[in-house]
Image (tube, rainbow, N blue to C red):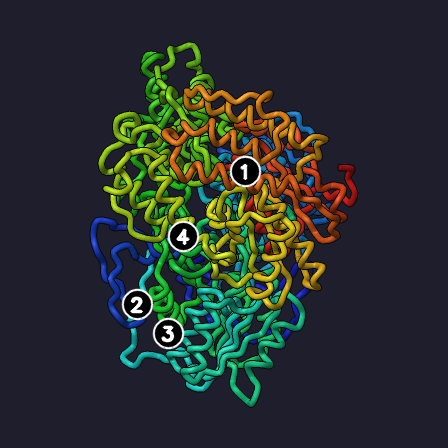
């Protein structure tokens, strides 16, 4: 909340939209504001300020246990809290001595009055000012300077709004070096003291909050002013405050602060009119249905739900129960961001003379990207669903006499969640829209939710410092906020101690002062024995370097979730789960500790803890000091995982033990150093994967990943008895059907499915035991698919052999008159033809014998000369006879996998593909694959053999991966991000499209 004395009421400005202006209606006089509290961004959020104790927090008139819920409110105080608010004259006089010399870069339109006056004011104070024009596509290089730049000021014009403004800020941030401070200066954008604000600019603070985490050294700051002199004063002050507004000489500073609900009146206000009609966009998603149930229980007679696609099976059940209870439930299909959809919703709600009493806007989309990676398409997908939809709904309902209008916003806007720049800005934009409505006498409430359990786009997700709230808690909070008519509130379960530990720089941001105080009370930001970088000067070089190494290891281990003593210092951090977002968190902590600017590339280009420590020591002038000794994990006796079940078991072992590489036959206790409590963790993780009970006695009868994989396979095989297997049946989007790889089940897609989000249904196409031809398998799938989905377009995909099955199934579906939206090939390939099939198989089987001899220390004799000239059946019989000793070394299930893989491979090699004119996406793994047995027919071109068959082929290269690790991190993260965009209907500009490519 911004608070302070309102000296002047500004004339209302029109709402700015992306490429169009909002319709204007004469606004009523704004309500008289409380001089100590205004409506814009009344930020509240739950926080775990006292984790050791338990509090009772009143919610909706009832006492609710709140062990981890202490509401925090954003109370902004005038600068100089506890005394008079500072005026411009006082600022200039008090800080005169700190502002001589220096160079500033001002980016704006050429004729921008605020920019011109600011430049003149800086020059009057002895500054050198360089002005440069900026657009929504800023140049990569700004004008050369004769000396370093002290600060950069971006002044967006009235026409640079919404998505274009986001891209402008992002582009400027990316184009600047780490040194100068970045300011974004707006004019009357924030809705202080009952003003309208400018929704097209009012979200900037959320974007600078994100930049504060992702590009810490830029100290990104939002300053909103009504006159240039105040902006000049703020620039010259160079203080810690990152969010400032000036009105008539009064300075307002945004801060988070603790909040409490007002006392509930004896007669509780009704939030639902009995017999009234209500609209919920995103209505058959999880949170939308929770809202619908609440409204129905409180007496709503008609509820209109909307979404871009129809309700799934779970949603249909909820809707059916609502109708059985007497509620008239309408379902309207359509994109709320498109013209006419909002008007249609209102028309349906008002049919038969019903009064439309309330609207909840819950539609939206998430596409997490770092600022460094954010592109126009990524932003547009998020912005359209959230912001354009909200504005169309507000416009359509402007003259409707509503009791309330609620926006389901996100805590990302309040906190500036790193990796969520687009999502934070979009949600802040709808917060600003609600402030605009309130200033014009219309109802408008915004709720910045954290994550929810069980339902919603981030169901059951723990976002490092935010744990989910339950649907019951969410419904209770929603009702309480409507009862008390709180304009803007955040509701989330927040851990300030962890936040300060991961992002220590927030201690330097007054906006987060309440959180850092709560973290201090909870004992947050445990930096171990780190005395601070200044203390290093008094230590001997070897002692200083040892201390640096320990602190670097401490920070990295804390972020990656390892015990520092278990973190292998010689393993590349990318192998331990480091991605670009995790790198930001490590970068933030180390910059705080060491006072260095850490390039993300140092972390992301294969550095280990040892390499990173060596870099840091060099930056601090200690490169010549002796490096601490650290030993990597032993690699002797390593046996690599041989199928998906073993890969999963090994991954679980590695995660729990904090090891870089675990062999499938290594003893958990004797060889890997596992402890009893870690074995219990393994049991819990495997039980979660299998969805059932597992005893430690069964799982650790033989304490190896190989034995654990047996149980995983058994569960997969039981589930795989269904031809169309529900891998994740719930979600509002159109489902995707993905086919099994050679010899395996669709359980191999677990990680990919998790990354596609909770709103994306996924079904598997499992293996036929009789292993027929590819064409026959596809024909069977077509029959099953048409039964499973009688209407609508199909989405198909698959890895390796599964991709070929998906391709042929799509071709046959199209021949049957069904629409196929796209086929996603996860590095699927069509083998090259060979002149002599028998000779090729003889070479393959002979190489297989060499492989098992080398891997298992056997002495199997099987030569090419023996096999050559035999037919395939005779060759295979001889292989099985000579390879019999393998039974003592490989579990039966693994041997079965080898057999079924061979059967499916032979089906693939007998397949004669035909052209297909539908849309095909090939996710291409470019690195050489470490095959156990190499076969020349699988040395393919850059289209994996599909180039000459597909008229609409899109190739998406997944860098740094090969065929076998494509579905493991980090490759699966890249693949999932792109595929999620396709499943959401987004096209990307950087994809390679090849209408015709020679095979």
- 123 and 110: which is toward the camera: 110
Name the N-terminal-most of marks 1 and 3: 3
Question: Residue 702: where, in percent of width, then height?
Answer: 28, 35
Check residue 483 in the rendering and tell me which mark sits there, or answer none. 3
**Neighbours of disc 4 within 10 Å: few (<14), some (14-19), many (20+):** few
| Res. 232 image quadrant | top right
**Neighbours of disc 2 within 10 Å: few (<14), some (14-19), many (20+):** many
| Residue 185 visible (yes or no) | no
The CA distance from mark 3 to mark 4 is 50 Å
The residue identified by callout 1 is: 902
Question: Residue 492: where, in percent of width, then height?
Answer: 37, 56
Farthest bottom residue in view: 352
| Res. 909 image quadrant | top right
Image side of residue 943 versus residue 76, left or right: right
Query: In this picture, is 473 found above or below 585?
Result: below
Name the N-terminal-most of marks 1 and 2: 2
The residue identified by callout 2 is: 59
| Res. 459 image quadrant | bottom left
Q: Nearer the viewer, mark 1 or mark 2?
A: 1
Question: Residue 531: where, in percent of width, then height?
Answer: 30, 26
The residue identified by callout 4 is: 718
């Amino acid at each position: 909340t911004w608070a302070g004395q309102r000296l002047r009421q500004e004339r209302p400005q029109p709402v700015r939209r992306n490429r169009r202006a909002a319709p204007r209606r004469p606004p009523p006089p704004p309500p008289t504001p409380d001089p100590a509290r205004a409506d814009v961004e009344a930020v509240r959020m739950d926080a775990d300020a006292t984790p050791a104790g338990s509090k009772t927090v009143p919610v909706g008139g009832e006492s609710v246990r709140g062990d981890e819920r202490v509401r925090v409110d954003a109370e902004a105080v005038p600068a100089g809290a506890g005394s008079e608010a500072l005026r411009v004259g006082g600022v200039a006089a008090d800080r005169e001595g700190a502002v001589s010399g220096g160079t500033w870069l001002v980016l704006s339109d050429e004729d921008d009055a605020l920019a011109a006056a600011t430049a003149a004011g800086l020059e009057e104070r002895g500054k050198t000012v360089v002005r440069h024009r900026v657009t929504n596509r800023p140049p990569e290089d700004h004008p050369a300077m004769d000396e370093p730049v002290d600060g950069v000021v971006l002044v967006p014009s009235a026409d640079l709004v919404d998505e274009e403004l986001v891209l402008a800020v992002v582009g400027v941030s990316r184009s600047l070096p780490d040194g100068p401070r970045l300011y974004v200066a707006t004019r009357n954008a924030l809705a202080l003291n009952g003003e309208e604000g400018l929704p097209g600019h009012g979200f900037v603070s959320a974007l600078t909050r994100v930049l504060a985490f992702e590009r810490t050294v830029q100290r990104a700051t939002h300053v909103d002013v009504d006159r240039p002199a105040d902006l000049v004063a703020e620039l010259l002050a160079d203080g810690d405050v990152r969010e400032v507004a000036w009105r008539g000489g009064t300075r307002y500073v945004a801060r988070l602060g603790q909040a409490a609900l007002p006392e509930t009146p004896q007669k509780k206000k009704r939030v639902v009119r009995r017999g009234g009609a209500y609209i919920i966009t995103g209505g058959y998603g999880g949170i939308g249905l929770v809202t619908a149930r609440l409204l129905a229980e409180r007496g709503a007679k008609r509820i209109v739900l909307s979404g871009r696609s129809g309700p799934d099976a779970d949603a249909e059940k909820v809707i059916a129960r609502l109708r059985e209870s007497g509620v008239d439930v309408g379902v309207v299909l359509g994109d709320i961001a498109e013209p006419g959809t909002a008007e249609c919703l209102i028309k349906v709600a008002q049919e038969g003379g019903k009064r439309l009493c309330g609207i909840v806007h819950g539609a939206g989309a998430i596409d997490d990207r770092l600022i460094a990676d954010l592109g126009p398409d990524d932003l547009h997908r998020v912005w359209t669903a959230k912001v354009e939809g909200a504005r169309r709904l507000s416009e359509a309902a402007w003259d409707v006499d509503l009791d309330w209008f609620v926006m389901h916003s996100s805590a990302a806007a309040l906190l500036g969640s790193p990796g969520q720049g687009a999502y934070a800005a979009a949600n802040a934009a709808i917060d600003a829209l609600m402030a605009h409505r309130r200033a014009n006498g219309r109802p408008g409430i915004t709720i910045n939710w954290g994550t929810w359990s069980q339902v919603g786009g981030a169901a059951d997700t723990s976002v490092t410092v935010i744990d989910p709230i339950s649907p019951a808690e969410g419904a209770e909070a929603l009702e309480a906020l409507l009862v008390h008519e709180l304009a803007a509130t955040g509701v989330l379960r927040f851990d300030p101690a962890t936040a300060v530990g991961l992002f220590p720089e927030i201690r330097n941001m007054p906006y987060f002062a309440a959180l850092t105080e709560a973290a201090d009370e909870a004992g947050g930001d445990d930096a171990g024995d780190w005395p601070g970088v200044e203390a290093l000067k008094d230590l001997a070089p070897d002692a200083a370097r040892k201390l640096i190494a320990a602190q670097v290891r401490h920070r990295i281990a804390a972020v990656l979730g390892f015990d520092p003593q278990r973190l292998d210092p010689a393993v590349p951090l990318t192998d331990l789960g480091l991605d670009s977002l995790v790198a930001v968190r490590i970068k933030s902590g180390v910059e705080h500790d060491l006072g260095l600017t850490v390039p993300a590339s140092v972390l992301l280009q294969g550095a280990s803890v040892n390499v990173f420590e060596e870099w840091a020591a060099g930056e601090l002038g200690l490169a010549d000091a002796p490096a601490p000794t650290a030993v990597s994990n032993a690699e002797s006796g390593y046996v690599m995982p041989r199928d998906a079940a073993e890969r999963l078991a090994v991954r679980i072992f590695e995660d729990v033990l904090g090891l870089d590489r675990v062999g499938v036959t290594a003893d958990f206790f004797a060889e890997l150093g596992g402890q009893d409590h870690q074995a219990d963790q393994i049991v819990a993780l495997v039980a979660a994967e299998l969805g059932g009970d597992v005893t430690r006695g069964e799982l650790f009868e033989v304490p190896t990943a190989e034995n654990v994989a047996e149980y995983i396979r058994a569960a997969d095989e039981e589930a795989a008895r269904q031809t169309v297997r529900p891998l994740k049946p719930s979600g509002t989007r159109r489902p995707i059907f993905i086919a099994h790889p050679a010899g395996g089940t669709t359980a191999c897609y677990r990680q990919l499915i998790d990354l596609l989000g909770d709103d994306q249904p996924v079904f598997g196409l499992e293996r036929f035991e009789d292993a027929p031809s590819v064409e026959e398998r596809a024909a069977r799938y077509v029959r099953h698919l048409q039964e499973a989905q009688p209407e609508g377009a199909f989405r198909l995909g698959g890895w390796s052999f599964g991709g070929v099955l998906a391709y042929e199934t799509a071709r046959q579906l199209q021949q049957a008159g069904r629409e196929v939206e796209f086929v996603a090939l996860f590095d699927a390939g069509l083998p090259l033809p060979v002149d002599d099939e028998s000779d090729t198989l003889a070479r393959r089987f002979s190489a297989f014998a060499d492989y098992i001899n080398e891997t298992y220390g056997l002495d199997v004799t099987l030569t090419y000369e023996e096999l050559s000239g035999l037919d395939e059946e005779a060759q295979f019989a001889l292989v099985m006879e000579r390879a019999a000793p393998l039974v003592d070394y490989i579990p039966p299930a693994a041997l079965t996998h080898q057999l079924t893989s061979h059967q499916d491979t032979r089906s693939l090699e007998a397949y004669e593909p035909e052209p297909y004119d539908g849309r095909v996406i090939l996710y291409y793994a470019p690195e050489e694959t470490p095959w156990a047995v190499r076969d020349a027919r699988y040395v393919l071109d850059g289209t994996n053999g599909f180039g000459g068959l597909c008229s609409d082929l899109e190739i998406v290269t997944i860098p740094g991966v090969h065929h076998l690790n494509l579905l493991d991190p980090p490759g699966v993260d890249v693949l999932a991000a792109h595929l999620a965009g396709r499943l959401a209907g987004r096209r990307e500009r950087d994809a390679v499209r090849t209408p015709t490519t020679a095979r």
